[in-house]
Image (cartoon, rainbow, N blue to C red):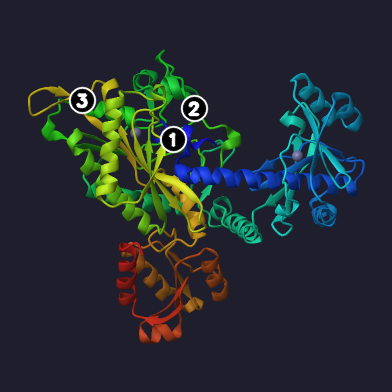
Amino acid sequence: MRPGENTRYCIFARAIFIKIKVFTSKDKKTNNMEQEKLNIVRHSLAHLLGAAVKSIWPDAKIATGPAIENGFYYDFDFTTPITEKDLGKIEQKMREIFKKWQSLEKKNISYEEAKKLFEGNPYKLELIEEYNKDGKELSIYTSGDFTDLCAGPHVVNIDDIKMDAFKLERIAGAYWKGSEENKMLTRIYGLAFPTKEELEAYIKQIEEARARDHKKIGKELGLFVFSDLVGPGLPLYTFKGAAIRKEIMDYSRELQEAIGYQEVHTPNINKAELFKVSGHYEKYKDDMIKVMSNYSKEEYFLKPMNCPQHTQIYGSEARSYRDLPIRIADFANLYRDERPGELNGLTRLRCFCQDDAHAFCREDQIKEEFVNVLGIIKKALITYKMEYTIRLSLWDPAKPEKYLGEASVWERAQKILEDILVENKIDYIRAVGEAAIYGPKMDIVTKDSLGREWQISTIQLDLIMPERFKLTYTDKDGKEKTPIMIHRAIIGSPERFMGILIEHYSGNFPLWLAPVQIKVVPVRENHNKVAKQVGDELKTNGFRVDCDLNEGNMGGKIRDAKTNKIPYTIIIGDKDIAVNKITVENRDKGQLGQMDLKEFITKIKKEKENRE
Ligand SMILES: [Zn+2]
Ligand SMILES: [Zn+2]
């Protein structure tokens, strides 16, 4: 993934929901050096893995073994297949062999020597031929009795390889050179970090992430389904999933209405012409889904973003400087033609919407617009209990050809944004070269409860699109001027955000978001009538209630409430009916004891309204 590439064009950016890493330029330097050092250790571990495998299976053929993110791998051609059960044995052998290693010694060799040395290994022979053809120097690295064809570099001090900071992770099939036409080899993956603590923390994070996988929890809680008949990347939200989605959208609505945004409703298909004017056609045609009409010859597309349509609403009337800002919000469905192999649960979809909006304003209004939007984004992220940092994405003045518009306009716009951050004492990092092609932006990078970073919110200044669509307003002096366009998203796509939230909360949604908020359980069948009355009263008060009057015992029903992570369970039995009360249990706090139904309703209404 190349987040930089993908965030460059409006909220069209795919990367909005892709985990990203953020570096300042200073961090980048130190990080690069440390990363290089770590890669050398990881690659040296790949040699050790090769040595261990050759020691256990002398007839296995070694292919290639590079360093990768989080560790390393080595590809082998085994005569008898191995399984993950063998990983412990291999790891043990690696530790055993390592004790005998003094160093990784480099030696340059001739083409003939190389061919002789790797005789019988078609993979190495193929590489030798290639390197030789390219005029590359051939070299080998030897440690103990293991020799590998390798250009290096490797650790100078063998003790840099920490035996307690690596672990073999898994095995997978991998085609030689990644081509399906070649033989399938066995890839052994290993994890490696600078310290034991970092390795353990990573393993813990992976296990936790696996347990919280939104696809797994989404299925367990019955939030959404996929159907082969509907198609990949097109989820169907159940009653429960739709309830969460609606809450997320309603909250974004509430936040944006408070700062003057109004909602419009726009169609899902557009003539290609619209995207030709906006410039999306040229850049993103292949990412848009084409639509055929029986009656018109023109090219149509399902829209991947709302901005071009909103320009048409703005442009439908003559605008005066007094009318501005005009703030347009839209929850229309958006479509992107993702590769089926890249689709992933709710975080990578073909159909979704966004809490997407556009403000058309004068230059002197930019500051206030940005401050207001930053305010609601901050409020939302506090509610969702997510930490965040702000990245100011600027253009790269060394590469003006990558951007639209004049240098002077860029410098002026960027200064406005930076001034806002400085004046409001907001911490931020500068990211040169990360701007959209039409203007600078503020990207809000959030952290979920597992410490993973997501870019979900964004505010972007657009100096180009209004001009392309020839949008104008009449200024105080009677002259026609071009408005500035601001693109913004609070939490981005409610559907994708739901995927993130499932993992962030591990399915334990706070009351306001929970698909079922309260479960009412009668102790015995003769308590059903009162239980139903209680359930109805709660529903009348606007809560999502599961009043469980089915056959089956109380224990099973309470267990079911726990499995479904329902915030409140109410038990109705003789002791409750006798004193006209209910017994309440909270998912996170445990037993709350007996309560008046009225008192309980007041309490949870407040909890819901405050989105606690
Ligand atoms: Zn090597
Ligand atoms: Zn936009």
Q: What's the amino acid at mark 3?
A: Thr
**Nearer to me, 318 or 171:** 171
- Mark toward the viewer: 3 or 2: 3
Local packing at callout 1 (Cα closer than 10 Å; few below 14, some 14-19, many 20+) is many
Residue 287: image tag: 2
Q: Cβ of disc 1 within 8 Å of ligand 2?
A: no
Q: Residue beneath label 3, please?
A: 482
The answer to whether mark 3 and mark 2 are in CB contact below 8 A is: no
The quadrant the N terminus occupies is: top right
> Residue 234 location in percent, x, y?
51, 38
Which residue does the image show at 90% across and 46% down from the upper left? 57
Q: What's the amino acid at mark 1?
A: Thr
Q: Residue beneath label 1, please?
A: 7
**Nearer to me, 26 or 62:** 26
For mark 2, give the secondary structure: helix
> Residue 108 location in percent, x, y?
81, 32
The answer to whether mark 2 and mark 1 are in CB contact below 8 A is: no
Q: What's the amino acid at mark 2?
A: Asp
